[in-house]
Amino acid sequence: MSESVERGASVRGWAEVDLGALRSNVRALRGRIGGAALMAVVKADGYGHGALPCARAAVEAGATWLGTATPEEALALRAGGLPDDLRIMCWLWTPGGPWQEAIEADLDVSVSAMWALTEVTAAARRAGRPARVQLKADTGLGRNGCQPGPDWRELVGAALRAEAEGLVRITGLWSHFARADEPGHPSIRAQLDLFREMTAYAEGEGVRPEVRHIANSPATLTLPEAHYDLVRPGIALYGISPSPEVGTPADFGLRPAMTLAASLALVKRVPGGHGVSYGHHYTTPGETTLGLVPLGYGDGIPRHASSAAPVLVDGKWRTVAGRIAMDQFVVDLGGDRPAAGAEAVLFGPGDRGEPTAEDWAQAAGTIAYEIVTRIGARVPRVYVNE
Ligand SMILES: *Cc1c(COP(=O)(O)O)cnc(C)c1O
């Protein structure tokens, strides 16, 4: 019965996730990092691929850390039946966050500011055990992280006093790049230099971190000197290149894990001059056939890709005809008459001739990260090669 329920749910549209590809991507990344450990970043539900199945596959392939943005994401993973000794880190905290739960779940938590150190030490007192704290340095991203100079000196000093009191263990020193996806950009060198300086200051004061880390996917792929003790790839795990400027997935032995497909809900013949979808932004140039794809922005298909993105139907690339609506969009099939129910592939690894998430990103004026991450909860994930 569950099988027919699953099939029923995935008739309209589905995101197939190839966990074999994900495992092989993790192995390809591990092949580049020497003795460094690998943290699989599975925030935002594994960039839309499903956090827990992807985490499990990444661990099978040798990831020893998981990373998430929010503590809730990390707590859900800790409750997910993964190995007990797996390290799980989360970095996006706001005042009043679940510090004590995080300590009790053995999470590594990131601290960028004094308010967070104050909250985590209070929670450690309540929990009766030390928190694993990683101090985050802003080496130039200008987002989260502690500023260099007096802010860093104050934070490091206070964290060391909390460590001496047995309230925290400073497990890591870390940072994040702004422009690692632009190989050779001078900001990369500047951030590495500042990271070296800020970690050296902390270590000089007595911090003994288990791990120092700064490398996201592009730095993991292109910048060995940024690997330190641990790398934090996200997008590359899912087989997608951080940007065309860095290279194609195949250049790095990566393979996209997600294929997004749907069953045509309708195929019909229409005369020339027929307006298509809201606003009639497309008009049939002559008599033709239209195919109705039952996915829309309610499923995370970007409306900005209207009249632009490619779809593979019956071995041919077709283009979205007119506006993408909440639940559906249309492709001009140029007179072909596939049966209703025929498969339309929006994107995948590309080896069946289908477009890729990168093609959709270019059509929508965004990045492939956003294309896969926004695929909505209404689209069932179907796991293969588990
Ligand atoms: C999202 C994120 C990563 C992973 O970035 P990718 O570009 O997907 O590899 C690593 N570290 C931090 C802090 C992040 O927020």
Image: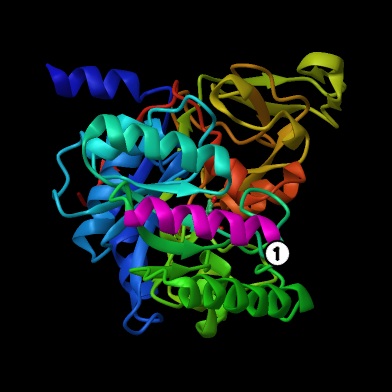
Q: Which image quadrant is residue 99 in?
A: top left
What span is in magenta? 148-164
Tag 1's secondary structure? loop
Query: In this rendering, is residue 297 above or below 242?
Result: above
Coordinates of residue 384 in the picture (x, y in percent):
25, 46
Coordinates of residue 187 in the picture (x, y in percent):
75, 73
Mark 1 residue type: Gly
| Residue occupied by mark 1 | 149
| Residue 203 appearing in the image | yes
Q: Main secondary structure of the magenta part?
A: helix
Which class describes the residues within 10 Å of circle 1: few (<14), some (14-19), or many (20+)? few
Q: Nearer the viewer, residue 133 or 352?
A: 133
- As for residue 207 lying within the magenta part, the answer is no
| Residue 345 appearing in the image | no
* Residue at x 47% of width, y 27% of height: 339
Query: In this rendering, is residue 378 above or below 55?
Result: above
